[in-house]
Image (tube, coloured by chain):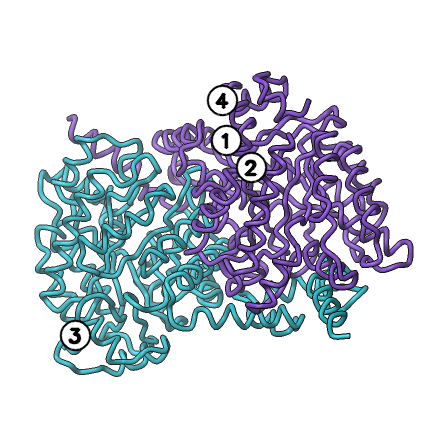
Chain colours: A cyan, B purple
């Protein structure tokens, strides 16, 4: 039985119990959300040492960090380090998007050191294998693509991005409308090239039932990729993006009917005033399936600082109902991220997720901020540091520049401390 | 004649012409917005070498960087450097909030090297003088407070924060409701202490007409401070904050009637779901006067990363109509910012302002993003770097890790480049 089938049969699994405990909600409630497809739980049957994690309605917003080699930057040790840094900084999941080197070996090595759910994009490995066999990706057989997906499932990967909605209809919608930046999703673009070369429909769309069989067998979550996600603000919420989203909604229903857990992926580059509409549209078209957004980036010109553009969009998205934020690092659009970039990206997304959780009233979110506020009131610096999302940086900043005039204050205000002035005012009144 | 009086008389000043040109709008339109009080133009008569700048309705969102010494960190050279860094990073104005050292000298030195509008908080200097005279701030005479304000105006300061709304009524509202963090505005807290000690009304409220006389004489913009701005999410949009805001609206009307330009300051710490309401409330209560917000910070627990929490709130605020964002640096709540912190803070706010401008459709905002999108489509890296908000960091990142396999791509994707795949798909179709 898969998790969704167990939930529907009224059985509360061990994994659901653990994830519900972590969220501070009842296991029955979480089980109901999973049964309805409004939440998913990462629980591939082939992975033993993973901490179960639920993503979806009523739960805290989760953050994913993408790591992985490229053909230009091929250092397994660095990727393991990046995975560790990501989790230390607060990422809930890691996706290994490696495209260079021994991909199964890299995946294995990362899963050996981390215990959070792991995602992949199997089409990258299919593509890398084609190159290894000295042929082009477009010459890949359908069987070869499905083989890679099943291998990932067998290796214990919890969720896979599959670009099932990149079909001929959505491609035609893009052609008809015109775009500034066409397709920026790697899996999406490669699928379009494959369709064009083979004059055939996307195998992951044409043979979706075969994908469902693999997913159900291993309890692998399908994360339906958005190959037509906008790559710039001008392309946002256009005909091809929404045509694909309508298809993803149909496929999501088929997955749920088949007892397969499903997540929907979303944009991308979206102007601030379209972020909330994008979330609402997805929730409506996909019957409440969890939404996993990349950013969204609210401007195209923040290269070097896209983690901040992504945090702005991500916070708004989380508030509007997005369940899962894929981080963006300062290296986005410029290079493969290193450990520094990973840390910056995760923290920015964690702030966005938490801001969204405060606004949508997720259980436990406000307690944290109230603890900080009380510590500030009492000028209790140790509790302030411990209450911060990043205690290490808070401590380092405070200790790098300690106050001299009044140890209870900081070097910003010193004798001008507002808290102290209010304390004095209260004392005057009491006298 | 002040700028607002000139605008009302139908005369388009040289300063308005220059600022309108910079915005790419007609000088007549800007003049009308200034006449109605929906925009202000920084143009203190006593300052000769300042580039005029307009802030308000229909204009691009502006960013202010706070710099200045404290009694613990007293280095004039560092503050001059911080001012330069702020402007290089894109700040439109600088506020010198120095509280330690020779305050007039520091102000003078900063104004000597920068040509953007400058703001101050004169109450800090009044307070510092009291300490210099070995008395407490609360022993200051009303005349001493007004003297400092006039000195700042004479020195060419373009706008001053004056906490006129911190009156006994707003203080009573706070007492009646209770707050987690009382007052976190330094000027606000000192004013409350003064009122409590002297059992008297706030002189800047009681003698507001005297302030108007000074402002009109020098064409000094009054930035009405929000002494009761919330210092934590739990205190947001409460009775004392709104009581003060109602007063600020009344004072703004009096200022406009007197031919004095006025800006309203706003929060602070505000949950994401209350940011837009805060902006709309201000615009309504203050008859469309420009709104100058600090952050807003959408969580209390981002110490060390408050520039990101502030960028999230700032973007949302700018979209909703805030005209002027006061940056927040990573050092906020921990220490006085250094040059690194200033740069990080300004860039984060510039991204927020630009994201807001894109969403509210400010003239010229979209062109910039379209140029970047086109450069990405054509893999034109030089234009991408030049189109970025921070070309220096973009170049540094790209050059630190140049692609080897395909120079046109980057080390993130290399041979997996989506742009390249789409190019190939198009070629296949054309064949």
Dot 3 and dot 1 residues touching (CB under 8 Å): no
Q: Earlier in the sequence, mark 4 or mark 2?
A: 4
Q: Earlier in the sequence, mark 4 or mark 1?
A: 4
Q: State the residue position of label 1.
A: B59
Indicate the chain on which mark 4 is placed. B
Q: Residue at x 86, y 51 (%)?
A: B129
Q: Nearer the viewer, mark 3 or mark 1?
A: 1
**Dots 3, 4 in contact, CB < 8 A:** no
* C-alpha span from label 2 to label 1: 8 Å
Up/down of B229 relative to B376, above or below: below
Q: Quadrant of the C terminus of chain A?
A: bottom right
Labels 3, 2: front one: 2
Q: Which residue is farthest right?
A: B133
Report helix, strand or loop for mark 2.
Answer: strand
- The residue that disc 2 covers is B62
Q: Are marks 3 and 1 on the same chain?
A: no
Depth check, front residue: B20 or B377: B20
Residue wearing tag 4: B29
Q: Nearer the viewer, mark 4 or mark 2?
A: 4
- Residue A323 in picture, x, y percent from top left: 32, 61
Q: Are marks 2 and 1 in contact (CB under 8 Å)?
A: yes
Residue A236 position, x and y percent, is 30, 39
Q: CA distance from mark 3 to mark 1?
A: 56 Å
Counting other residues with Cα less than 10 Å from the Cα at mark 2, is it few (<14), some (14-19), or many (20 or more)?
A: many
Residue A320 at x, y percent in the picture = 33, 55
Residues under labels 3 and 4: Cα distance? 64 Å
> Depth check: B41 or B364 in front?
B41
Q: Chain of mark 2?
A: B
């Amino acid at each position: 039985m898969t998790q969704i089938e167990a939930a529907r049969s009224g059985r509360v699994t061990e994994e659901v119990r653990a994830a519900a405990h972590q969220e501070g909600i009842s296991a029955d409630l979480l089980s109901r959300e999973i049964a309805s497809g409004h939440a998913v739980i990462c629980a591939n049957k082939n992975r033993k040492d993973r901490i179960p994690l639920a993503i979806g309605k009523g739960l805290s917003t989760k953050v994913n960090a993408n790591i992985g080699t490229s053909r230009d930057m091929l250092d397994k040790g660095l990727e393991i380090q990046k995975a560790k840094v990501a989790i230390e900084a607060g990422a809930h999941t890691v996706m290994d998007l490696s495209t260079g080197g021994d991909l199964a070996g890299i995946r294995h090595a990362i899963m050996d050191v981390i215990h959070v759910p792991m995602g992949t994009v199997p089409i990258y490995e299919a593509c890398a294998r084609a190159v290894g066999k000295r042929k082009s990706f477009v010459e890949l057989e359908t069987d070869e693509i499905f083989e890679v997906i099943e291998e990932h499932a067998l290796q214990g990967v919890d969720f896979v991005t599959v670009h099932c909605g990149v079909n001929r209809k959505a491609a035609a919608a893009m052609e008809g409308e015109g775009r500034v930046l066409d397709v920026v999703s790697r899996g999406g673009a490669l699928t379009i090239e494959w369709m064009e070369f083979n004059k055939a429909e996307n195998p992951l769309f044409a043979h979706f039932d075969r994908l469902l069989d693999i997913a159900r067998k291993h309890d692998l979550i399908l994360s339906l990729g958005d190959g037509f996600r906008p790559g710039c603000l001008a392309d946002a919420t256009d005909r091809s993006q929404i045509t694909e989203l309508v298809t993803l909604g149909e496929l999501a229903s088929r997955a749920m009917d088949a007892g397969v857990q499903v997540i929907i992926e979303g944009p991308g580059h979206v102007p601030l005033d379209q972020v909330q509409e994008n979330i609402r549209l997805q929730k409506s078209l996909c019957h409440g399936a969890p939404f996993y957004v990349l950013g969204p980036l609210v401007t195209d010109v923040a290269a070097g600082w896209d983690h901040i553009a992504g945090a702005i969009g991500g916070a708004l998205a989380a508030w509007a109902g997005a369940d899962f934020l894929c981080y963006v690092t300062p290296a986005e659009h410029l290079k493969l991220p290193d450990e520094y970039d990973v840390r910056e990206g995760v923290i920015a997304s964690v702030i966005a997720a938490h801001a969204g959780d405060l606004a949508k009233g997720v259980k436990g979110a406000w307690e944290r901020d109230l603890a900080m506020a009380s510590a500030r009131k009492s000028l209790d610096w140790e509790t302030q540091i411990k209450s911060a999302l990043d205690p290490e940086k808070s401590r380092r900043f405070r200790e790098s520049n300690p106050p001299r005039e009044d140890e209870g204050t900081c070097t910003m205000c010193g004798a001008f401390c507002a808290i102290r002035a209010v304390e004095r005012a209260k004392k005057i009144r009491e006298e």
